[in-house]
Image: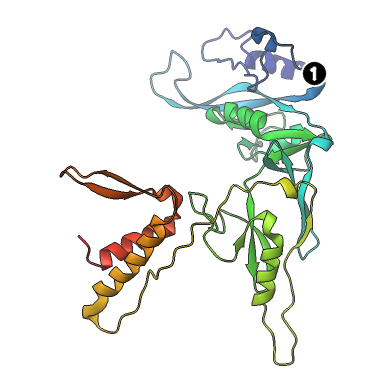
Amino acid sequence: MTNQTDARREQARGNGVAQAGQFGHQAHSAPGAFDNNWWGQEEAPADTIAATSIDVSVRRFGLPSTRHRKEQSYSTPGVLSVEVPIVERADVPAVATITDRHGKTRSLLIHDGNLIESTGKSLEEAVLADSRVRERSWGQDESDPPSIDEEHLEALQQDAADRWIIVDGIVHRHIDEPVLIAQPWGVQLESARYARAVDDRGFITGDTVFTLDEWDQAKATAEASRRTYEDGSRTADEGIAFEVGEALAGFQTKYRRPPALVYDAWPRYDRWEDRHEVHARELAKMRSGIASVPGAVSRVDDGLGGTRAVIDWSKFSEQQEQDYKRLVKNSDEQ
């Protein structure tokens, strides 16, 4: 490291900063990296933590110095210090190995109940590749450090401490649980949020959506929907290959299926004047199903000396709640 870099790092840590307009930035340890002796516990062995410190330019907004009267964007030298726990390979079993039709393979692992996946990068590489860290832009000097917004610096340190682990020298990150989507051309592995396969309450939204521990059902559904031609041939299966891992048997999905309710949210009617009656009939079916779900309906004081029924919609999908409100409206119920 050059003398210039050494000086910049010391300045970033608040050492030797004396001139007006210069601001030191004291790097913060990641959560959990404090001295455990304060709690009467022994300090964690050094070989259970991987750490890196990277010189950065911290982008801020405010008053650069007491001489300034107007808030503005400015940068100060800083140090991005990241600490990540090291985990033994034996403590990170595989849930599944997925291979797409191009032969690209990804392994979904599990640690402390969280799904994780390898980034394929060392700790420093993973930090620099994080979207919150910007490499020097075109035209900047090669000695200029990467930059990061002030609010992102500690957020990245926290994220790394909470959601990253090191396995065999490689960073693995927590990932959101994906889903299996059964398509006529095979089963696909997709982000639940991107595919809109799970609502905000965690309920699965469709009959072709399956969790990781439902591979057999997903495969069967995809097979049943494959097209068969007149000559007896079928469309090619271009879906993923799914290799079950040792941890799949104990995998606990975070998603759930909504209660099965029998009703038609869009009932047909022959005469316009019958529309309210038809919708009221479907509403009655839906209410009967809702009442059969334990704890779904309670009664509260209506303020008129009686009670009224209240539905706990957390037990039902967002779509079911929307369907209920539509039936109430179309039945012309007051």
Residue 146, percent from left and from top: 66, 32
- Residue occupying the far left of the picture: 304
> In the rendered view, would you say 188 is above or below 116?
below
Residue drawn 80% across the image and 48% down it:
246
Identified by mark 1, the residue type is Ala
Picture coordinates of residue 115 (x, y %)? Answer: 68, 43
Q: Which residue is drawn at 52% across and 15% down?
A: 21
Vertical relation: 264 (above or below) 29: below
Quadrant containing the N terminus in the rendered view: top right
Rendering colour mode: rainbow
Between 292 and 155, the one lying in front of the other is 292
Instruction: Identify the residue at horizontal 67%, vertical 40% (top origin).
Output: 114
- From this viewpoint, is residue 146 visible? no
Q: In which quarter of the image is the C terminus?
A: bottom left
Q: In this view, does 192 lie to the left or right of 45?
A: left
Q: Please tell me which residue is depicted at 39% across the width and 71% down the height of the picture.
A: 264
Q: Which of 47 and 128 is in front in this view?
A: 47
Q: In this view, does 333 lie above or below 49?
A: below
At which x and y percent is residue 322? Answer: 37, 59
168 versus 275 height, above or below = above
* Callout 1 crowding tier (Cα within 10 Å): few <14, some 14–19, many ≥20: few
Relative image position of residue 305 (x, y in whole percent): 16, 43
- Which residue sits furthest bottom? 230
Q: Nearer the viewer, residue 183 or 160?
A: 183
Please give left or right for residue 274 compared with residue 64 in the image.
left
Give the quarter of the image for residue 137: top right
**Judging from the image, what secondary structure is the residue with disc 1 in?**
helix
Q: Can residue 305 be seen in this view?
A: yes
Left or right side of 139 for 246: right
- Label 1 sits on residue: 46
Q: Which of 45 and 9 is in front in this view?
A: 45
